[in-house]
Amino acid sequence: MQPLPHSYQATATGEPKGEVSVSSANVETIITAPPAEFGGPGNRWSPESLLVAAIADCYILTFRSIAAAAKLEWLTVSCDVTGKLERKDGVTKFTEYTIHAQVKISEQANEAVAIAALEKTEAVCLIVKSLTGTVHLDPQVTRAS
């Protein structure tokens, strides 16, 4: 890792109606639109879906480091995140996030170490730690047969 602080940049461009183009250096541009819940088409990435995707993505990338440090023998990890958007005290915001994380471990791997790695990942994931709202983790371990 490079020394902190780090700086990240993205640009969004749009017109009075329609899609928004989101870009950043050296990566593919993505097209976004409002979600169906806000009158959008519901068939594009939205700021809301990108937010929960960022949590899931950061969780997986963080898990890799935590599992390596724990010397956990694992095969696959998946992460499904649901964010709850509601109006509280006159402000519409995400109030809670549920992370369903499942790791498949080798036959020899220690299940307790796997659960601990899933829990530590949630505790240190920088995207999760950067948000307000309650986080619920549902960690699951399956064993390769």
Image (tube, rainbow, N blue to C red):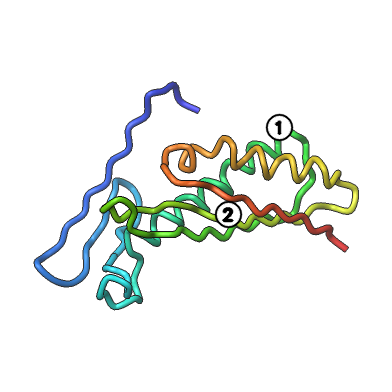
Query: What residue is at 46 percent from the left and 57 percent from the top?
Result: 53
Q: Which residue is mark 1?
A: 69
Depth check, front residue: 6 or 132: 132
| Amino acid bearing label 2 | Ile
Query: How many numbered dots are placed on residues in this image?
Result: 2
Q: Disc 2 or 1, which lies upstream in sequence?
A: 1
- Please tell me whether residue 138 is drawn above or below residue 117 in the rendered image: below
Depth check, front residue: 48 or 103: 48
In the image, residue 63 lies at what x, y percent? Answer: 63, 43
Query: What residue is at 27 percent from the left and 68 percent from the top?
Result: 34
Depth check, front residue: 62 or 94: 94
| Quadrant position of the C terminus in the picture | bottom right
In the image, residue 85 lies at what x, y percent? Answer: 39, 59
- Please tell me whether residue 3 is drawn above or below residue 50 in the rendered image: above
In the image, residue 59 lies at what x, y percent? Answer: 56, 47
Q: Which residue is mark 2?
A: 99
| Amino acid bearing label 1 | Ala
| Mark 2 vs 1: CB contact within 8 A | no
Quadrant of residue 138 within the rendered picture: bottom right
